[in-house]
Image: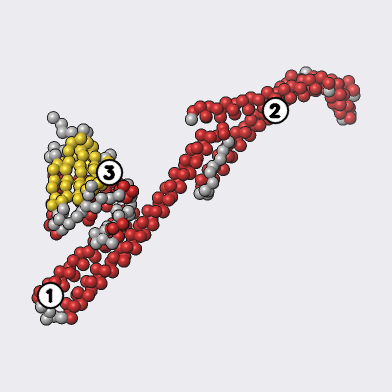
Amino acid sequence: MRNKYRRLKIRIMIQTLGISIIVGLIGYFILDVFVDGVLQEPFAKTVVYSFQRLGMQELEAIHLYRLIFWQNKGLIIGAGFFVLFLFSFYLGMSRFTTYLRQVETGIQMILNESNDKIDLPDTLEPLEDKLNGIKENLKEQRRNIEETEQRKNDIIVYLAHDLKTPLTSIIAYLSLLNEAPDMPEEQREKYIGIALSKSKRLGELINEFFEITRYNLQNITLDKKEFYLYVLLEQVLDSFEPVFHEKGLQCTIEVDDKILIYGDPDRIARVFENLLRNAVSYCYPRSSIEVYGVIDGDNAKVVVRNQGKTIPAHQLKNLFEKFYRLDEARSSETGGAGLGLAIAKEIIELHDGTIQADSQNGYTSFIIQLPRKKEEL
């Protein structure tokens, strides 16, 4: 790249130098040879004659000519050469400004979102590559934004449609309870249980609407402090105990109790809440969810693994995109807004960590690497 720019500079320098030499030779020929040589006598007679026309005597005119032109010949020739040099410099810079105009055209193509490839002269090949790279990057960003916006709109449509189902059921069962005050107790309890279950699902869907809004408005900030990862994970898992029990899931935890993290415990807790919620949504009934963490050099490595349908590789790489949901989540009772993993990734990266997913042989794992704080001895 440097060599290409050096070639451009050398070419401009040679062009400018060549123009200067050519203009200098022309100036020398005109001023020193032609004017001071061949045309010297006609030029002198013309000037003297002009002075005489102004009322001067011939001797006075000749004396004035010598005073102005003869005695200052060197100065006049030098001034002429200086003017010619400025002209040559202008011609040399015109080539440079031509390059600038061509670059400006390329930038305008980027601003106009043109589909045409930016084509610059060979000497501007490095700039051509950079401008085309910027153009493609911006095009890719616009495409990603459009896809994300479309996914968000799809999610909102799905959620809006899904809101009708539990709401209709709630109204129907409450209407039956209201119209039959003498309904048998067993049947009443059944209807109340169904209405309560549908009400909870309705609440989850409404929370997902709020999640979408919060994600669009929030800027995640961290309130860092020291905490032991094992203690935090125990608290998070305790809060999921009723969910595990309801779905007949077993959860095991094996985390080194010496792992000390310097970060925002509330945000890190949210990461694991999102991962566990995702695991619950996509694991097989009556299967197990495993959480284990070990010290891995200067990092803490934590894995959340569940047993469920293997996620294809082409879907696996999209899991952390905003508003992305697996196809089966669209018809699932537990399909969320597709923000949990995107938020988890953002929080982990704010802690200078990494998160990745792996799915094979009926197991899906989320692997987190977080910088750990070493305890002072």
> At 63% across and 27% down in the image, what residue appears?
15
Q: What residue would you read off at disc 2?
A: 83
Q: What residue would you read off at disc 1?
A: 187
Q: What residue would you read off at disc 3?
A: 356
**Type of residue at label 3?**
Gln
N-terminal-most mark, 2 or 3: 2
Residue 91 lies, in percent from the top left, at: 66, 32
Q: Which colour scheme is used?
A: secondary structure
Give the structural element (helix, strand or loop) at label 2: helix
Q: Can residue 302 be seen in this view?
A: yes
Q: How crowded is mark 3: few (under 14 residues within 10 Å), some or many (20 or more)?
A: some
Distance, label 1 to label 2, CA atoms, is 106 Å
Give the structural element (helix, strand or loop) at label 1: helix
Left or right: 53 in relation to 4? right
- Camera-nearest label, 1 or 2: 1
Residue 351 lies, in percent from the top left, at: 26, 41
Q: How crowded is mark 2: few (under 14 residues within 10 Å), some or many (20 or more)?
A: few
- Residues 166 and 352: in front is 166
Q: Can residue 226 be seen in this view?
A: no
> At 22% across and 49% down in the image, what residue appears?
362
Outermost residue on the front side: it is 361
**Type of residue at label 1?**
Gln
